[in-house]
Amino acid sequence: MADMARASGASVVIVGGGVTGLSTGFWLARAGIDVLVLEKGIVGWEASGRNGGGATHVYSPFGLEEQRLWPQMDELLGYPTEYQPYRIGVALSDTQLALARRWAEIGQTRGFRWELLDRRQLKELVPIVGDNAIGGTYLHFGGHANPQRTVQAYAWAMQDHGGRIVQHTTVTGLTQLGGRVTAVETTRGSFGADTVVIAAGPQTGAFADMLGIWLPLAPARVEMIATEPIPLMRVGGVAGNGLYGRQTLRGNLVYGGGPHEWINVPDMATPDHANTPLVRNLARRLAELLPGAAHVRLIRSWSGLVENTPDGLPVVERLAHPDNVVIATMSSVGFGLSPAVGRAVSELVRFGRCQFADLGALALRRFADTPRDWREHAGWAAAPSAVEAAAGGDD
Amino acid sequence: MRESDPRSIAGKLVPPERHAPLVVVGAGAAGVAAAIEAARAKVEVVLIDEHPVDNDMMAMDVPLCFGQRMDGSVRNRALMLERVVETNPDLAAAHEAGVDVQLGTYVWGAFVNGPTVQELPVSMLGLADDRRSWLLGYDRLIVAAGARDVLLGFPGWERAGTLGAGGAAALLARYRALAARRIVVLGSGALGLSTAALALEHGVEVAGIVEVDGRIRGDAALAKTLADRGVPLFVSHTIQSARGRTGEIESAVLVTVSRDGTPVAGSEREIACDAVCWAVGLVPNVELLHLVGARLRFVSELGGWVPEVNARMRTSAATVFAAGDCTGFHEGMLAAPDIARAEGRTAGRAAAESLGASRAREAETRRVTAAPPADAPHAYWRTWLDSLIAADGWEVNVCQCEEVTRRELVETKPPRYLGWRSPQMSARSLTTLLRDGPLNQDQIKRLTRAGMGPCQSRRCREQVGLLLARASDTTLDRIPLPTFRPPIRPLPLNVLWPADEPAAMREEWVSWFGIPTQFSPHWTAGMAIDEPTAHTRLIMSDE
């Protein structure tokens, strides 16, 4: 009977097997807590596993912990994340250089070291930059990892510590009793819980709504490209010219950036991951950034869906009512911060507060006055559905 | 009223440089027939075909497996164009009928509005030649993209000289540029026998036809003709390896297999050859159909994933039709090219009528099909695969581009270049992965990198699927289709890039959303939605 009880619930049930939910699950399981992750598809399948992999967010309240944890993650997890330290910012214009410098200086104010590179120094480090580069920055902090490998690493490490993952299971409701959520309802039955973590990406708002809580989120589609492998550069973390990304340890150049498309995520279904001709503009930006690689072949592109709050900042909060629920959305910047955020959420679950950072600024109350039609006001609404005219067939 | 976000894609995806009422992709029998039929109904038609393919593309085994056996003449674009035209007389007929025929043009993408894309002004294709890329809008699309090769790995298959039947036929008959003198054909069905016959016809010696089955699978009379012309037939055999002192195939080692599929020790025989050609089947090219959202289903008898089409060759995507081998291929069709033509005509007429052309007088054409052979190709490929594995094939690279062996694939090992070892990793395998959910090839690709290389999995897609099905004790129809993404041809950045961009695309480009507060230091940031901080400039932009 113990098995039956265990199978139908857990001390902590996490809704969403993205990078935030998985990292949270890992930290909880590592602390010996009975944890279960419910995922509608495959772990890390959405934005968590298809992003640029950047891990340089020192501006964030989670930033110092991000920098402290990443170099240890391979060892902590027992699986490879492909984490690589350091970042090089390439500037093709004074404006881009000012942006790169500003990013570096924020790191400096938090105690990290960086250097300004002239064109010659830049070319020594990154031989495929061109004469169009005016200089750059070398950050002796930050870094990047492989999102696909990292999400799987969290999931496996969590299992190794006794946590459980149930995939292909969609959450359909949250049962409340006596001011608490007592169970998570799914397409595979009810899972009882002492504490519930909602980390469901673009769907987080819909779950908050089930609890009568207003969480303004706007989903959007963003795109990335990948080239065939080229010889490894000394530092793979090279970006600029409006692109984020990296050279992978295999040698592929993997970059994203440029315009996003605001969309609606109609239901809990797994959406497709369509691309647009934007892949050509991305190719151009990349060839401008690294002219020595302009002849390299593009072999893949993909898109991902991310969600943003009105100020682009996360919501990470243990709710007052119901008081056993933690909500976590990273507002489209979740991968790099995930080691720290998962740890923070695990502490919100265990102790009711994050012990290493003040998360007060990330609380929901800042949106109390945000109107329901805020997306229209912000210009973040999806295009009116352009239903393609049906072909005049006769079948 | 809808406000606008200058950083969003709204309004930046400009209409393509050209728009055609009907675009036909693929100038084989089906595509040409479709284009001519529609042109006769007074529809403006653009017919696109990637042949002649340039040497660099061929060298990657794209779109067919050419096995590095192209001779230098393929670099002569004018000559190759001449040959492609000369060997396909239908092209002239299409031109006569008023079809705009564009050869040497790759179709690398198809872009349509859907659940997560609403900002495209029209449905469009991404096209390219060897110098530049452009976009072509369409009202109707007919995909007649043909079929591609199926390869299975054996020790030495990385050497130059491992071809597919499609690549061999193209080099022999179309390009007349096959750089091989003595070829071993694997497979004795209609495809294998016709490949051997084609080779002989072009003066290439056939060093043997190898069949894992205990019988010749194709036409007995044709097999006898070939045998009479001195072609050795090796039934109940498999290929153990291809050898060579350099990177070239110089011989093939064959071995007898017993009834249960295991190689018989001591039965090895080495045959001199400079090419080994897989001719065990072809797979419908459904990449474009997948990209336009046409519903696909797995039908082993038709070569795998094929589009659902109605009697008039229309797919589930209302504006997209399909015809010819890409709707399903089996060896019986080799003897009945009229089927592809009939499908093409049906699709061309249906597309024209959907664009307003008047209905043809004749009764609605029913889809004519040749009866597929009784045994499904995937079971046959599986027999080959089992024999190759039994012939010591676990350490063979299943994916050449990424150098992933069969063993590494089924053990879901991280790639070798990571040099990763941990007890936790060693305890993981396909078996443990399957405890968490059904097999998903995209997930396994991400973990092992099999199929992630520049050939875009053309050399390994089928064998990866078969191997995973084998290891998980299931069949391919139960495994979801691994996705296709643009570009479906590996093209250089400086070919794909647009020569010019709308001003808004350049001026409003940001690396992320351009939300003023998103990357502001938390110790200084204001939180209100319309209160940009002093660090607005943090957002990466040219401005």
Image (spheres, coloured by chain):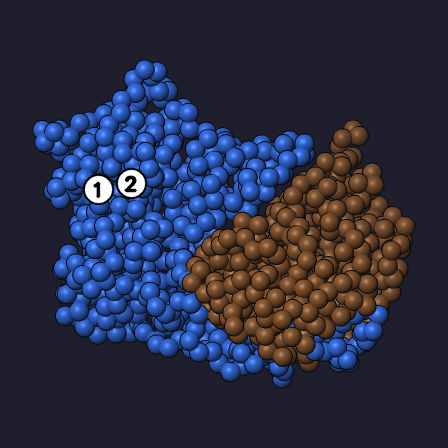
Q: On the rendered structure, is B443 left or right of B174?
A: right
Q: On the rendered structure, is A66 left or right of A236?
A: right
Say few, some or many: other residues with alpha carbon within 10 Å of mark 1 (under 14 / 14 to 19 / 20 or more).
many
**Residue B311: in sight, yes or no?**
no
Judging by colour alone, the chain drawn in blue in this rendered image is B
Give the residue type at disc 1. Answer: Ala
Q: Which residue is mark 2?
A: B161
Please tell me which residue is depicted at 31% across the width and 49% down the height of the picture.
B64
Proximity of marks 2 and 1: CB atoms separated by less than 8 Å = yes
Vertical placement of residue B431 versus B201, above or below: above
Please tell me which residue is depicted at 30% across the width and 70% down the height of the picture.
B22
Quarter of the rendering containing residue B542: bottom right
Which chain does the numbered disc 1 sit on? B
**Residue A114: in sight, yes or no?**
yes
Specify the quadrant that holds the C terminus of chain A.
bottom left
Which chain does the numbered disc 2 sit on? B
Residue A93 location, x and y as percent? 59, 78
The residue lying toward the viewer, choosing from A65 and B243, is: B243
Q: Which of the labelled discs sits on residue B499, or is there none?
A: none
Residue A291 location, x and y as percent? 49, 67
Helix, strand or loop at disc 2? loop
